[in-house]
Amino acid sequence: MVELKNCGHGMHKKNPSVSTSPLPKRFLPPLYISWSMWGLGALFYLVGFFHRVAPAVMTDELMKDFSIGAAGLGHLSAFYFYSYVAMQIPTGLMTDTWGPRRLLTAGALVAGFGTVLFAAAPGFFWASAGRFMIGGSVAVAFVGLLKLAANWFPPRRFAAVTGMALFFGIMGAVSGGPPLRLLMNYYSWRSIMLGVAAITLVIGSMIWIFVRDAPSDRGYANQAANEPDPAGGGALTNTARKVAEVFSYRNTILLFFIPAGIVGATLTFSGLWGVPYLTTHYGMSTSKASLLTSTLLVAWAAGGPFFGWLSDLLGRRKPIYILGCLLCLIGWMILFFVPGLPFYALVAALLAAGFCSGCMVVSFALAKESLPLRLAGTVSGVINMGVMAGPMLLQPAVGYVLDINWQGKILSSVRIYSLESYQKGFALILTWVVLSLVLLLFTKETWCRQQT
């Protein structure tokens, strides 16, 4: 008796001599391959974080070379953030369309040339232009990393991998502290920046050669389910539509401002004003002060993976974030408004503020889970734009307050600011952290699951 089978185009005989088993399924990529793809992008993110904080240990040299005060130094440092923030929404959209490989490669190449311009700058204008190029180009690093994490890792690992991204970034920031200061004992800051430019160009080349956008490009099964984009239209139309759709979700609006206060506090202190504050009012050397601000960054690096892991483990986002923000606020209040702290108490306050600042990584998981997956790159760019708005606004704002309250004291051609001046400037930081804590109360919990 012959068995008939309907194959969609009519009735056919089934031949028992021919195998009917399905084609072999493609396996998910081994974790070591996922980490290697992601790790090369993380190296670029490390370089970007180095540039964020490098001015903190070069304050005297930059103020002398370019004849600027606190406000000018604040702007020079913040030019990195001006372009970084402006690039976030375009970066999110380009990540969704170009893919992380091309975006990260292009970013690394532009960052390398921007670093050369900064190192060779004859005056404030060209130095600012170099910082502007660097900020705009490294802006693609974090969102590109998030896209690689979503593509190469299981969804349950997303928050933890995001925490590891912060760890890599802060290791870059640490390299912009004592190691940079040590190198400056032997080489000029300009020579060091030229070396960093060369390293950045090498990283860009490695990304282009080895990194792939998704596991399917290497013959593996994709980790993330692709969601089709339901609307057509031109690039400008799609851009406006995606941004409008992203901001139609309450969590997006709140998470635009919340991590800005936390990161703004950390990078304004460790990335610019912490070293002169500690050298002036605790009598430390520049090397020792930069070591302490780097300690804060190391704590931040440890806090990011911890809060991401804890959030994934407990299946909650909101309460973990609130607790971290509250403890972070207490740490900054002690550090800024309890003068003359004993050394170990000072270190403890720095460690507490830095470690608890790691709670901000929950922002990206909370935002991604609140929106459709097809908007993952766009919403990551929007949230990262808010993150960097904190230091972008606070670094020059604190500088302005310092200059307004400057009492005319100068040492070795560098302005010296009073404790009262610093406290008035740092009050701006605390205000934003308090606002972040209040806004967190109005966010919607996702329970570590994709809501839409």
Image (tube, rainbow, N blue to C red):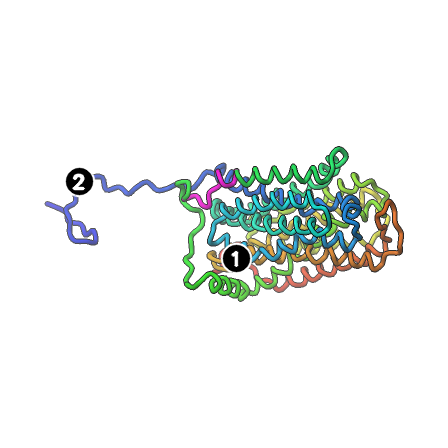
Residue 447: x and y in percent read 54, 56
Label tally: 2
Residue 301 visible: no
Task: Looking at this view, name the residue that lies furthest to the front.
Answer: 122
Q: Quadrant of residue 435?
A: bottom right
Q: Which residue is mark 1?
A: 378
Local packing at callout 2 (Cα closer than 10 Å; few below 14, some 14-19, many 20+) is few
**Left or right of 25, for residue 237:** right
Tell me the kind of residue under disc 1.
Thr
Q: Which residue is mark 2?
A: 16
Q: Secondary structure at mark 1?
A: helix
208, 322: nearer the viewer: 208
Residue lying at 56% horizontally and 50% vertically, measured from the top left: 140
- Residue interval drawn in magenta: 206-216
239, 288: nearer the viewer: 239
Residue 117: x and y in percent read 65, 45
Tell me the kind of residue under disc 2.
Pro
Residue 16: x and y in percent read 17, 40
Q: Is 211 contained in the magenta span?
A: yes
Q: Is 366 contained in the magenta span?
A: no
Residue 115 visible: yes
Q: Secondary structure at mark 2?
A: loop
Local packing at callout 1 (Cα closer than 10 Å; few below 14, some 14-19, many 20+) is many
Q: Are marks 2 and 1 in contact (CB under 8 Å)?
A: no
Residue lying at 48% horizontally and 59% vertically, measured from the top left: 372
- Nearer the observer: mark 2 or 1; the answer is 1
116, 253: nearer the viewer: 116
Residue 337 lies, with reference to residue 14, above or below; the image says: below
Residue lying at 30% horizontally and 42% vertically, measured from the top left: 23
**Left or right of 214, for residue 398:** right
